Image: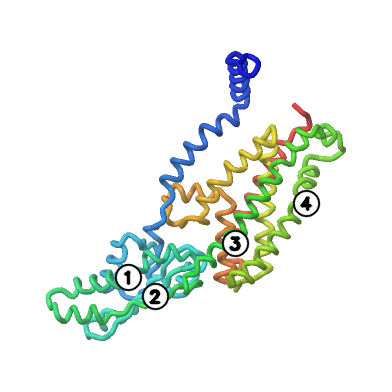
Amino acid sequence: MGRFFSFGRLFAMLAKESIQMRRDRITFAMMLGIPLIQLVLFGFAINTDPKGLPAALVSASQDRFTRAMVSALELTGYYRFHKTGISATEAEMLIERGDVSFVVTIPSDFAVRVQRGDRPQILIEADATDPSVASGAISTLETVVSNALLRELGTEAETARRAANAMQVVVHRRYNPEGITQYNIVPGLLGVILQLTMVMMTSMALTRETERGTMENLLAMPASAAEIMLGKILPYLVVGAVQVVVVLVAAKLLFDVPFVGSLVLLLFCILLFVLALVLLGYTISTLSRNQMQAMQLTFFFFLPSLLLSGFMFPFRGMPVWAQYFGEIFPLTHFLRVIRAIMLKGADYPVVSGEVAALILFALLFAGLALARFRRTLD
């Protein structure tokens, strides 16, 4: 028995492993802290039925019927009008940039047509690039506006009921009229695949040298920190280019995803995104002591960016604090860019804010990586 199993040897092994875990503080902290942080973060932030979606109102009149319609829509909880009294051109720019999810257009003669007993119309344009965002808000429209008009018309019950029933709500699902989920998911998958592979591969660039014992040779080379960094990350840009071609061709041939924007602008944005990712991976590599830590830090970054970027769950459905948190991930901005270009045909002025964010990420990660790089093995 003592030859095959001994409690003394078992306790000795347990003590050894405990000491090693205590020495590897980064891994130990991630094992305990990350599950708790993710549980709290995702439990509060993820919402599949988004409310309070930004909307714009195009209306030249502020009569009581128009105000009743706006109040009724806001009381559903789905609509939050933060742009009112704007022109149709301004509204078009807002929905193309993704600043609003809905544009409600009420004609100037709406009140006259209601009182005259005609068939008044309200036009609601929904940004349907993400079908799950628009579906809940659209499903309540007919009942909500009819009841609002019925209440506003007041005591003449039969006349009011006829007017309410005659009212027509015209819904335009912009950019994805059939509500096809693949049109929203497949372009986003390009960003997710690039993030997973680019960050993971470059996060082990320096730690692999350390574990193989070649780091000393690398440091002895007459190369600057910037040259070593570029030498490590540039080959992965080629790998990223191959992935981009494969995913875009598959998106068109297999899923028939529309592409209505500029290919040159899209490739430029993808290049910025990939550059930011490989620089982020290289930064992680300078922070890690070994490949295991690099892998853990990569997943620590990957999971929240996947869940809070708007890829899996509606970005507008998250609380405001979670939306601010989601803004710190390059994937959030890339998803807006690629969906805007591919599905909406957006040009550079529309996506310029997101492009600036990607450039800022690349510069920030490059600065951090160069600041963290050490010319010694200490």
| Residue at which label 4 appears | 235
Disc 4 residue type (three-letter): Pro
Q: Residues within 10 Å of mark 4 (few under 14, many from 20)?
A: few
Rounded to the nearest angstrom, the CA distance separating label 1 from label 3 is 34 Å
| Residue at which label 1 appears | 141
Depth check, mark 1 against mark 3: the one in front is 1
Rounded to the nearest angstrom, the CA distance separating label 4 from label 1 is 52 Å
Q: Does the CB distance between marks 4 and 3 fall below 8 Å? A: no
Disc 3 residue type (three-letter): Ser
Q: Position of residue 60 (x, y in %)?
A: 35, 76
Mark 3 or mark 4, which is nearer the start of the sequence? 4
Which SS class for mark 1? helix
Disc 1 residue type (three-letter): Leu
| 107 sits left or right of 166 in the view | right
Rounded to the nearest angstrom, the CA distance separating label 4 from label 3 is 27 Å
Rounded to the nearest angstrom, the CA distance separating label 1 from label 2 is 9 Å
Depth check, mark 4 against mark 3: the one in front is 4
Q: Does the CB distance between marks 1 and 2 fall below 8 Å? A: yes
Residue 108 seen in the figure: no
Which residue is rendered at x = 41% and y = 45% of the image?
Answer: 44
| Residue at which label 2 appears | 171
Q: Does the CB distance between marks 1 and 3 fall below 8 Å? A: no
Marking on residue 352: 3
Depth check, mark 2 against mark 3: the one in front is 2
| 258 sits left or right of 210 in the view | left
Q: Which quadrant does the N terminus fall into?
A: top right
Residue 149 seen in the figure: yes
